[in-house]
Image (tube, rainbow, N blue to C red):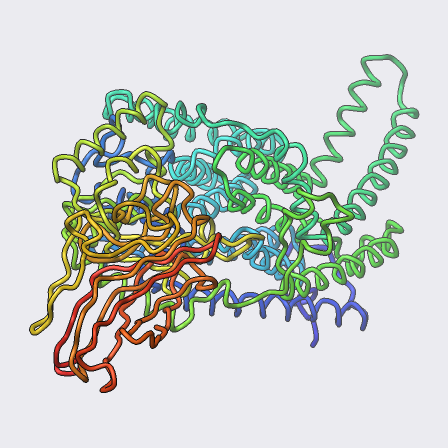
Amino acid sequence: MTDTDSSTETTATSPPRAAPGRALKILRGLVLGLSILWALIIAVVFAVRVGFPLELEWMEGGTLQQAWRVQRGLPVYGPPSPAFVPFLYTPLYPALVAALGFVFPLGLPLARAVSILAVIATCAGLWRLCAIEDKPRAHRALAVGLFLSAYVFSFRWLDLARGDSLFLALVLWGLILLREAEDSWAKTVLAGVLIAAAFWTKQTAAVFVLASGVGGLLVAPRRVWVYAGVIAVLAGGGVLLGQHLTEGWLWTWIYEMHQTHAFNEVRFREKTWGMFVHASPFMALLLTALVGVALGLALRRAKQLARAVGEQPRGILAISASWLRGIWAGMRATRGPIYWALLAFTGLLVSALGYSTQFAEPNAFIPGVCFGAAFFGVALPDSTLRRDELAGLHGPRRIVEHLGLALVAAQLIFALLVEPMYQPIQSHGLEAGLRHSYAWQDPRRTLPSRAQREAARELRATIEALDGDRLLALHRPWWPILAGGDGHVGAMGITDVRPEQRRELQRAILDQIRSGEIRTIWIEGNIPRWFAGRLSRWTVHERRWGEQRVRPMSGWMSEAGMVTPWRGEQLLLGPPRDRELPPGASILADFESGTFEGFEVVSGIAFGRRPSRGLSRRGLPPIGPHGGAYLLSSAASGRRQEAIGEVRSPPFRLPAGGALELLVGTSGTDRGLEAKIVGEDGQEFPLDLPRTRMDLRTVRFVVPPALAGQPLRLHLRDRSKQAAIFVDDLWLFMDGPSNR
């Protein structure tokens, strides 16, 4: 592959270049090819994920809920209520999604498409900023490739229905225009507009505002004041206007509530930087080399300046002025690399600050990744510049460029093969944890399979069939809106507010449960303690575990990036409901009387003194689905699953071909558990226990001719101290279930 950009893509003011050597051509071609490969991979990933029917990351739904409210003119920044609590971000992204929702269907694909377009704009910006600094095509490509190759490291966040990618694109293009603003008032104003828009997308942009003010003094000293003024009017003035329109609530949500979150100093001082080096070891080596070269060059120029100053007239003022002029001239001559180095440091600082905030995830690393990639694209020297030959720098630059391109290629290949998982190092130290801190890349952690898509479509259909006005989906606030309701506060909203506001929200939700305004609740994992007591008389209507769950593909609850993946269940809870008795069936026992209904305790205490409810107060996970309010459980005593015991049913008689049908389940293992039919003569017929985990499945026993008309009993035995068996709804069919 030939690299002709050094001769064909120069401007009138570009310095002359020599043709690259064979080794350099190979390295540039390799980096260019790997960057193109990464662009193709990310394009496929985005195409596969954009249409996923439910959340790819659990907070996507909250963003859509906010966009839905904007569309309907409902307040976004106001007092917290059971209906809605906003995310602690500025409103531009959901407002943009809401506006586009008048043209396209408002939903997850639309919101993700906005993020994908922002990623494309960011890649174009990285290419553009390297071109501004007169870098060859391979250097421009490596900036794009390094950015995209960190997709997994930043928790697969770029294509989500979240504002991060739009924020990044606006910040990057604003800073690119500021870099070009020295001779253009229009670019100065537009740069300020974009940075202000970035602030209204995510208030983290405020750190870039401060840093770009310093950088602007170097790259556009005569115009930076206009840039700052535009930001002050649009961001600062906008906050004042927002305060007026929201009766003071805007500042509460975008600033004051953030201050209630804890700050993790260990993450800021150590973990963030360790994770960057751990995920990008080859870039850490390149950074070390570039810093060394920069220090050497700075020392060389300082010596030249000292000689020049020494030849001038003496005097403290004169010498000081000469030094300042020389330093300024040197900085202006290298203002591009200095500008992007300052912003790369700012991006890393923003990442560290963001990741150190309570509840933060590695999406906080996106600014550091992007501006780090920009810095490497700009700072890597172009050894084909002829002016370097005249200055005696050609040899060192050639070595550094060759080394840099080789390290970039190694990093792009490394990121293609390996997923970093830093937690073992954090927990056990570098020596003990390093070999467990990487995993081979697995597309299944990124791309939803056909089975996952089918499960998501089926679950979405289930959600849409519910009564949305009476549905609370604590971790999925978009689900009640999918079901035709007006939405409800989510778990993040309840967590984000002050303790006294949190208690008030919880009381309001409990009142809605008590009054019947909320009749169904979707839960991810454990039931929160604050309303577990209110649901003690409810039951599990639907349970999804294992492959049945529809989990996010990014962030919390996903397999992605998790050393210990989340294994919680998805539960649909509601008031008890009886199963419909099929025609021709009779009830042997359903325990809805609150008694054993003829069951006798043979031994032990496992089954307690009475039937149990599915939502036990004894610290067990919810049991079910099952019929009605009560079931028979061998974890009913105070010793829970540790207790052992045996019970038997009242006798029943069935003709040949008749059947006993019952619901049976276990707490996760059937070891030490037994269910069997015992005849009058002592014959035993074991029942196969279904593979369940706190849920119950239908089991049938068809009476053979030899047992026709004989008294039969169901025996349940629990001899395990780690498991329990559950039974409900014993139905008798005189003609067998096959006739139903």
In the rendered image, which quarter is residue 418 located in? bottom right
Residue 167 at what x, y percent from top left?
Answer: 44, 44
Q: Nearer the viewer, residue 401 or 473?
A: 473
Q: Is residue 486 left or right of residue 426?
A: left
Q: Does 617 appear above or below 127?
A: above
Q: Does 540 appear above or below 296?
A: below
Q: Nearer the viewer, residue 395 or 369?
A: 369
x 22%, y 52%: residue: 596
x 69%, y 46%: residue: 425
**Given the current orientation, which residue lies at the most extreme front position?**
681
How many numbered discs, if any?
0
x 48%, y 31%: residue: 206
**Given the current orientation, which residue lies at the most extreme left position?**
583
> Where, quadrant-wise, is the N terminus in this rendering?
bottom right
Q: Does 570 appear above or below 271?
A: below
In the rendered image, which quarter is residue 533 located in? top left
Q: Nearer the viewer, residue 417 or 574?
A: 574
Residue 89 at what x, y percent from top left?
Answer: 38, 35
> Where, quadrant-wise, is the C terminus in this rendering?
bottom left
x 65%, y 46%: residue: 275
Residue 460 at what x, y percent from top left?
Answer: 25, 61
Task: Evaluate whether residue 157 shows in this view.
Answer: no
**Given the current orientation, which residue lies at the most extreme top position?**
316
Task: Evaluate whether residue 451 shows in this view.
Answer: yes
Residue 194 at what x, y percent from top left?
Answer: 42, 40
